[in-house]
Image (cartoon, helix red, strand yellow):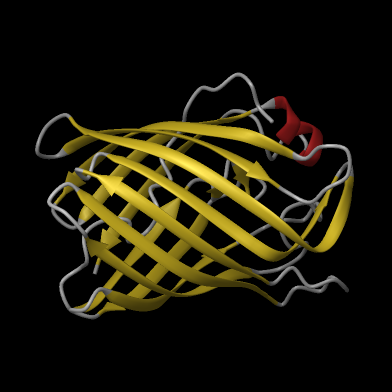
Amino acid sequence: MRCRLLLVLVFVVAATGPAQAQGWRGSIVLTSDYVQRGVSQTDSDPAVQGSIAYWYPTGWYLGAWASTVDTARRYYAASGAQAEINGFLGYGRRITPDWVIDIKAVHYFYLNDPAPVKYDYNEFAASVGWRERLYASLALSPDSTQFARTGGARNRTAWAGELSLQQPLSPWLTWMLGVGYYDMPSAQVAGYLYGSTSLAVQLRRVTLELGHFRTSSAAARLFGSDLAGDRTVLTVSLSL
């Protein structure tokens, strides 16, 4: 786990907020590095991402999210896969004027993964938000398969806990802060800390975000300093 945290771009969980208005929502994203829980999924290279989801007036939503990946080193998550696709089903609702909740189930799968061991897995997540400023989430995967420099495990339980803060600085500028812990099934190192801090500029449907990520030294032992550690990421997203 990482002890020294220079917090990075906040992960704020998708749909962790009040229930969306009914209808389709989507986005197209370009990022200089796809970072998940503090670790690069693209060997520090850029990624193209996109999402599409439908929200029902009852609070239910379903959709899919996709990203290019480039994990030539076989560590985290799928060696040689060309894309990651997440299908999800969730429910988000405001339960009081100050509090919102969100629960969802996600299936992760990797296209054209040549590895003999499949990395596809399921994840169940729950989050709570206060005044659209402070968020806490917990995610559990009962069938995670991971390989790291210290060893690997198949179809084991993994979990992640995260806290994040969003602070508007102006109508178009937001500062975000996040910290989390990922407990993964791997030999010798049980898990690691990760964190982020970022600034996001909202220009109508376009968002520019500059974030810095950091992990504890345990992540570097698991995946190497080229995938874990410090990194600064620029992301541009277009809401559809």
Against 42, residue 214 (above or below) is: above
**Residue lying farthest left?**
171
Q: Where is residue 83 in the image (x, y as percent from the top left)?
A: 61, 69
Quadrant in the rendering for residue 72: bottom right
Q: Report the side of 83 relative to 103 (left or right).
A: right
Depth check, front residue: 123 or 195: 123
Task: State the quadrant of the C terminus.
Answer: bottom left
Q: Which residue is drawn at 57% across and 34% down?
A: 194
Instruction: Give left or right: position of 133 versus 152.
Output: left
The answer to whether one can see residue 225 in this image is no
Quarter of the rendering occupied by the N terminus: top right
State the image coordinates of residue 90 (x, y, percent, origin top left): 39, 72
Residue appearing at x 37%, y 78% in the figure:
62
Answer with the quarter of the image where residue 139 lies.
Answer: bottom right
| Residue at the far front in the pictured view | 96
Horizontal arrangement in the rendering, residue 143 relative to residue 170 (left or right):
right
Residue at the image position 31 percent from the left and 58 percent from the top: 101
Q: Is residue 215 left or right of residue 204?
A: right
- Return the x and y of residue 161 as percentages of the image width and height: 53, 44
Give the quarter of the image for residue 91: bottom left
Classify 39 as above or below 195: below
Can residue 75 be seen in this snapshot? Answer: yes
Residue closer to the observer: 147 or 34: 147
Q: Where is residue 35 in the image (x, y as percent from the top left)?
A: 55, 46
Could you say which is closer to the camera, residue 105 or residue 218?
105
Figure disc tally:
0
Would you place residue 155 above or below residue 74 in this image? below
Q: Considering only vertical position in the picture, is 132 above or below 26? A: above
Task: Report the front residue among 216 and 111.
Answer: 216
